[in-house]
Image (spheres, coloured by chain):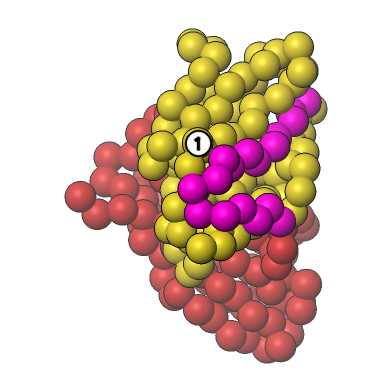
Amino acid sequence: GAGVSQTPSNKVTEKGKYVELRCDPISGHTALYWYRQSLGQGPEFLIYFQGTGAADDSGLPNDRFFAVRPEGSVSTLKIQRTERGDSAVYLCASSLTTAETQYFGPGTRLLVL
Amino acid sequence: AQSVTQLGSHVSVSEGALVLLRCNYSSSVPPYLFWYVQYPNQGLQLLLKYTSAATLVKGINGFEAEFKKSETSFHLTKPSAHMSDAAEYFCAVSGRTDKLIFGTGTRLQVFP
């Protein structure tokens, strides 16, 4: 079956612009996670959803970052007033429920110039 | 609080040699432990996971890991390396909250 998909695969933007990153989880998976991976580092947790609600958003670095999952399936990570330090690979993962194995998408590589 | 330390950012082995990638964890609750592999320009793929059942966990591609509570370790091993094993390997821990806390990764190189 289809895995987790993320669009776009690459995004180049200018400092101060707004960006949206999309994640399509595996069909039927109720839990969805966002991570950020900077160059040479391991992924860092940002936020996770159980259904439509954000169950834990403790990893969001500041209020420029926001994520939604309005229908409990597709999720969008939104970054306002982008900064060069936001450049990273943004990874999405989904699992059947929480406490189940997380399956990762290929990521969106964001470059802020 | 939970954390993971991976000793050695780069490991090089010859084809056919033993692979040993080290991971130590810290957790205030009984941990779930994971090893993921990341091939260039691909997403993370689960190799194996420990969830408090058997302490010796077997995964895909001939990898295995042993949970040692006394040493707070979860090292990854493979008896004989293949060229196709060259990749970045990440150890991760989670607790009740289910978010994964990753180490900084170990890049494995395999020489012919």
Main secondary-structure element of the magenta-colored stretch: strand
Q: Position of residue B42 (x, y in %)?
A: 45, 63
The yellow chain is B
**Would residue A24 appear left or right of B27 to someone viewing this image?**
left
Q: Colour of chain A?
A: red
* Quadrant (top left, top right, bottom left, bottom right) of the N terminus of chain B: top right
Kindly identify the amino acid type of the residue bearing the numbered disc 1: Pro
Q: Residue drawn 34% across and 39% down? A: A29
Q: Is residue B74 above or below residue B51?
A: below
Q: Quadrant of residue A88?
A: bottom right
Q: In this figure, which residue is indicated by the disc labeled 1?
A: B79
Against B41, residue A75 (above or below) is: above
Residue B2 percent location from the top left of the image: 75, 29
Identify which residue is drawn at 70% across, 67% down.
Answer: A39
Query: Does A61 lie within the magenta span?
Result: no
Residue at 78%, 26% (x, y): give it.
B26
Which chain does the numbered disc 1 sit on?
B
**Residue A86 showing in the rendered view:** yes
Q: Position of residue B48 (x, y in %)?
A: 47, 33
* Crowding at mark 1 (Cα within 10 Å: few <14, some 14-19, many 20+): few
Task: Please report the bounds of the magenta region as a residue range.
Answer: B10-27
Check the image and report above or below for A89 versus B49: below
Please determine whether, in this image, residue B25 is positioned above or below residue B12: above
Q: Is residue B24 magenta?
A: yes
Q: Nearer the viewer, residue A100 or A32?
A: A100
Residue B111 picture location, percent across and down: 56, 62
Residue B101 appears in the rendering: no
